[in-house]
Image (cartoon, grey):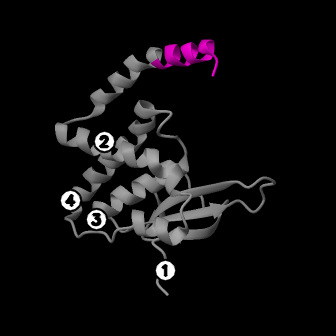
Amino acid sequence: MAPDAEQAIGLAWRRRLPGRVRSLHALRSPHEAVLFARVAAFAAAVPWLMRLPLPRLAALVDRPPRRRRTRDAAVEVERLERLVTLAPRVARPLVRTGCLTRGVTLYRFLRRAGLDVELRFGLDPRAIDADGHCWLTLGGEPFLEREDPRPRFTEIWRLPLASS
């Protein structure tokens, strides 16, 4: 890389640093800061995880949900959704934006928190170029989605894997 390009990248990153640091004020406790570090590290690894064979990926990210009191579930969902949204703002370019990073990361941490969510992957059959999406479901219905992806995307795969 040319020295001028390196300087431009370094300068751009430094200009964004104060905003990234301010974003960390959204963390509400030391425990949440540790959880955020785990979420961001996992989210940064998602592009590499998605290169694994599907059964290996499933073994790494899937964990049967633990039993937890329902009262805590809503608070934990809000916290995890907020931390996953914060990760690319603070750690970009290491943490990518998009449904894949968001979906796989939320799936792993929500399952560990005790929610019986599924992660579904689909393709748009009408798209000329491959257009895909992944989304969470809870009880068979889209979960934490702005709009229902099922009319547009045909499901091709899901986690947890169906047992044979």
Cα gap from disc 4 to disc 3, whole angstroms: 12 Å
Q: Nearer the viewer, mark 2 or mark 4?
A: 2
- x then y, percent, for residue 56: 48, 68
Q: Look at discs 3 and 2 and give the one toward the viewer.
A: 2
The residue that disc 3 covers is 114
User: Marks 1 and 2, Cα distance to the nearest angstrom?
Assistant: 30 Å
Q: Nearer the viewer, mark 3 or mark 1?
A: 1
Q: How far across and down, in percent of the image, does residue 40 sit? A: 38, 42
Residue 162 shows which numbered tag? 1
Q: Earlier in the sequence, mark 2 or mark 4?
A: 2
At a point 18% along the width and 37% down the height, the residue shown is: 30
SS at mark 2 in the image: helix
Residue 6 shown in magenta: yes
Instruction: Give the residues drawn in magenta, as a range.
Output: 1-13
Contact flag, marks 4 and 3 (Cβ < 8 Å):
no
Cα–Cα span, label 2 and label 4: 22 Å
| Residue indicated by mark 4 | 71
Pointer 3 local density, CA inside 10 Å: few below 14, some 14–19, many at least 20: some
Element marked by disc 3: loop
Classify 121 as above or below 42. below
- Give the amino acid at mark 3: Gly
Is 114 magenta? The answer is no
Mark 3 to mark 1 CA distance (whole Å): 19 Å
Q: Quarter-wise, where is residue 128 in the image?
A: bottom right
User: As shown in the figure, which amino acid type bears the numbered disc 1?
Assistant: Ala
